[in-house]
Image: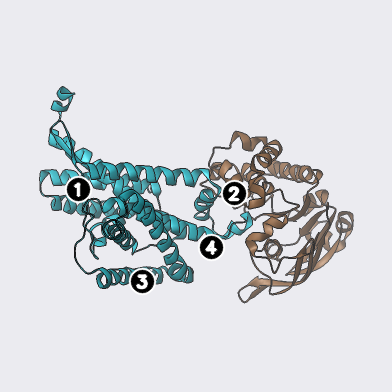
Chain colours: A cyan, B brown
Amino acid sequence: MQAFLDIFDIYLLEAVINGILLGGVLALLALGLNLIFGVIDVTWICYAELVMIGMYGMYFMVQYYGLSYFVAAPLTILLVAVLGAALHYLVIAPLLTAPPINQLLATGGVLFVLQSFATVAFGIDFRNLGIRLPVLAFGDMNFSYARLLSFLAALIGMVAVYLFMTRTFTGTAIRAISQDRQIMALMGVDTRRIYLITSALGGALAGLAACLLVLQYDVHPFVGLSFGPITFLICVLGGLGNFIGGFIAAFVFAEIISLGGLFSDLEWGYVLAFAFFIVMMFIRPAGLLARRR
Amino acid sequence: MLELRGVNAGYGTFQALFDVGLDVKAGEAVGVIGPNGAGKTTLMRVISGLIRPSRGSIRMEGVDLVATPSHKIVSLGIAHVPENRRLFPQLTVDDNLKMGAFMKEARGRYIERLEVVFELFPRLKERRHQMAGTMSGGEQQMCAIGRAMMSNPKLLLLDEPSAGLAPVVVQQVFELVKRIRASGLTVLIVEQNVQQVLKVVDRAYLIEAGTIRASGTSAEMLASDTVKEAYLGV
């Protein structure tokens, strides 16, 4: 094993693996956003702020009410799922037939409302769970348990969504509705109900992401800014609404960030990733997996 | 079974149907013929609830369809095969059929209905894992009819099933309609292919500019001067 590891630069391998671990969580974030866009044809600009609220939920449940992490996590997922459904019911549903720019502005407004709400309610302090997970040493490589756990949970979450979407009647309807929403009534499908379920599912994914991110990052009202924009870039790079494209793009981005960070500072990894995005937008403006016209 | 009285309907300010009255009795096959833009498709859509009438009443076995939410109408036993088939092109044949059995009443009998549909269309069974959009026009029409049959309907609405198909395939589609009839299903079919459709239906309505102009048995329609001149080219 050691001989095998010696062939590679150990730090390179570590960076590649860390990239994969990061990619899992980014893919989970992208999936939620893609689901909403692909099915309802609406972009939740405030998606990362739902995650932020979820992270606060985790913080308060664990630190304030003393719940264990594994009790707080399902409650948080449920909380953000309800929040997602409420966002649809209160903001999106009345604007479904409005021009896309109005929908964008409305969810953009929700972003500021949530940020301001968090600032007023929770203050601008950085808070964390106070859980410090150990670091796993493997040869000369170090991996944080938090990242490994997040990666696995993200993967399980995505597999669960995949099974739901392919095996159940409701999941099949969610896929069908994005292809022809007018005839759904002929199938006996109440589109409003499917939209609500989809929104709750998108919220649940944001909630799961919150449970995982809170292990690695401190919570503050503007934490959404540190992963919101990158989630959007991933979705656009993969082709908005394209689940598989988003999945691949998440790992491409994560590797660029991780490897770029290896050769320089982590911040340069982000610079490189954004530069890559800009170049790709010239080459493949409709996303990585778009068909050539 | 189905009863329309004084139905007006349209899109926005454009009115497509004027005072339409129509009856379909259980076990019958009824055709609706007429030129392009006469309101045939609108008539189908107003029955299945895709558009709502601005006036008039529509009843299915006594139940008021106008007061029924559109997604509940299929539960009353009305399955609509829409114009241009409208399959979900990026879903497999299996998933398309699954959508046909979405409503609660049909889910429990999903496997059973799937067998009925596969028996009617063995071709669909061969293609069950194929994307619906990649099949030929005839196969897509089978899939669309199959999807409608999944809900175990009492009344099947067929909107231009022969449109856009090769002549040989058109023959097959009409053969199919005959077989579906023979299975005891009530059928309301809209067609431009007047000669063909009058061979498979018991009665027909002629619709022009949104109004019913004539109606009668197939034989009467075939003999009628209006129909002959305008649609049979005799």
* Quadrant in which residue A64 is drawn: bottom left
Front residue (pair A113, A146): A146
CA distance separating discs 4 and 2: 16 Å
Circle 1 chain: A
Say which residue label 3 marks.
A105
Letter of the chain that mark 3 sits on in the rendering: A
Give the CA separation, mark 4 to mark 3. Answer: 22 Å
> Label 3: how many residues lie within 10 Å, few (<14), some (14-19) or many (20+)?
some
Q: How many other residues sit within 10 Å of disc 2, few (<14), some (14-19) or many (≥20)?
A: many
Q: Which amino acid type corresponds to the residue marked 1 in the rendered image?
A: Arg
Q: Earlier in the sequence, mark 4 or mark 1?
A: 1
Neighbor class of circle 4 (other Cα within 10 Å; few <14, some 14-19, many 20+) is few
Have a look at marks 4 and 2 and say if they share a chain.
Answer: no
Q: Quadrant of the N terminus of chain A?
A: top left
Tell me the CA gap for discs 4 and 1. Answer: 43 Å
Asked if badges 4 and 3 are on one and the same chain, I answer yes
Q: Please, is residue B125 above or below residue A57 in the view?
A: above
Residue A33 visible in the shown view: no
Picture quadrant of residue B50: bottom right
Which residue type does callout 4 highlight? Arg
Give how far across and how far down residue A186 sits, in percent: 63, 57
- The residue labelled by disc 4 is A192
- Would you say B19 lies left or right of B68 here? right
Q: Amino acid at mark 3?
A: Leu
- Is residue A182 visible from the viewing direction of this image? yes
Disc 1 to disc 2: CB gap under 8 Å: no
Which disc is residue A266 wearing?
A: none
Q: Which residue is mark 2?
A: B99
Read off the residue under disc 1.
A132
